[in-house]
Amino acid sequence: MPGTTIKVRSTEGGEFDCYLASPKDDGPVPAIVLASAVHGVDKDIRDLAEEFAGHGVIAAAPDLFWRTVPGPLGHDDNRTQPRSQPRLEKIKTGERDMADTLSHLKTLPQFNGRAAAMGFCYGGPYAILGPKRLGYAAGISCHGSQMGDYINELGGVTQPVCIIWGDQDHRAPPEVLNAYRPVPSRMNNVEVHIFPGILHGYMMPGSPKAFDQKTRTFSMQRTLAILDSLRGGGVPLRKAS
C-alpha cells in the first residue's frame, strides 16, 4: 500500500519526518515501527513499510537522524557513519523518537494500541529497547549491530522478541552470537535465529551482495506471525534455528 511522509511532533521540540503506510482495513489493526540502518528511510525501508501495509498492519518509519543529517543517504555517502556516532549516545537519543512515533500511532483510529519495533543494523537494539521501556508490545531485530551492548536489557522483558542474524555478519562477531544463542533456553519469550553463510544486510535488495531472499522470507514470516499475535490471537514463538 503506497505510503506518505508525515510529520511527528517530538517531545523535545520540533518535528521529524516519518514514512507512514496504512492498510485498507478500517481497523483496529496492530502497527510496526521500522528503525532503519544508518542509510535512513531509504527505498528499502519504504518498500518494507508498504509491504507490511499490504499485510494489513500500519507501518511507520521515523527519521532517526533528523537532528544531524536528515533524510535517506546512499550507501556510499560519507555522512552515514558520522551521523550515527557516538553510537550508544545516538541510540539513546533515538529512544525518544521511537516513543514519539508510537504516541502518534495512538492518535490513529485504525490502530489497536499494540505495536512491534523492528530494527535493522543501527536500529536493531530498538527490538529490545522498544519492549523494555518504550511501550512496544514486541521487538524484531534483523542483522542488528551493537547488540552486545544490549543483551542485559533483555532482563525483565516479557514481550515477544525475535533476533535474526547470519553467521557471516561482520557487525555481529562470534562473541555476540554466542552470547545470544543460549538466551531462548532461559527466556521463553525470546527467539534467536542464526543462519549459516548469511551476510550483514540480508533483508535489503539495495545491498545486492548481502541480500538473501530465503532468509528475508523467513524473517518476514516470523514478523508477520508476531504481528498476528498482536491482533489478539496469540502465536507461539519458534525457538532458535
Image (tube, rainbow, N blue to C red):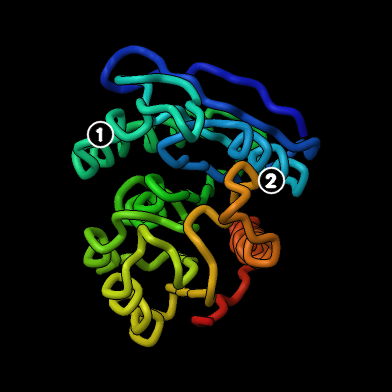
- The residue shown at (56%, 45%) is 32
| Element under disc 1 | helix
Q: CA distance from mark 2 to mark 1?
A: 26 Å
Q: Where, by quadrant of the figure, is residue 236 drawn?
A: bottom right
Q: Residue at (41%, 56%) from the top-left corner?
A: 144
Residue 138 seen in the current view: no
The image shows residue 5, relative to residue 226, as above or below, that is above
Q: Where is residue 141? Give x, y as percent.
A: 46, 58
**Residue 92 visible in the current orientation:** yes
Residue located beneath label 2 in the image: 52
Q: Residue at x 37, y 45 (%)?
A: 122
Q: Residue 92 or 8: which is nearer the viewer?
A: 92
Q: Secondary structure at mark 2?
A: helix
Circle 1 sits on which residue? 93
Figure quadrant of residue 232: bottom right
Residue type marked 1: Thr
> Going from the N terminus, do you reach mark 2 or mark 1 first?
2
Few, some or many residues within 10 Å of mark 2 (<14, 14–19, 20+):
many
Q: From the viewer's perspective, is residue 228 above or below residue 75?
A: below
Picture coordinates of residue 198 (x, y %)? 54, 67
- Which residue is depicted at the point 55% across and 75% down? 237
Residue 22's image quarter? top right
Residue 203 in the image: x percent, y percent? 59, 53
User: Can you say which quadrant of the picture contains the N terminus?
Assistant: top right
Q: Position of residue 143 (x, y in %)?
A: 46, 58
Which three-letter amino acid code belongs to the residue tagged 2?
Phe
Query: In the figure, 80 relative to 213: above or below?
Result: above
Q: Residue furthest bottom?
A: 185
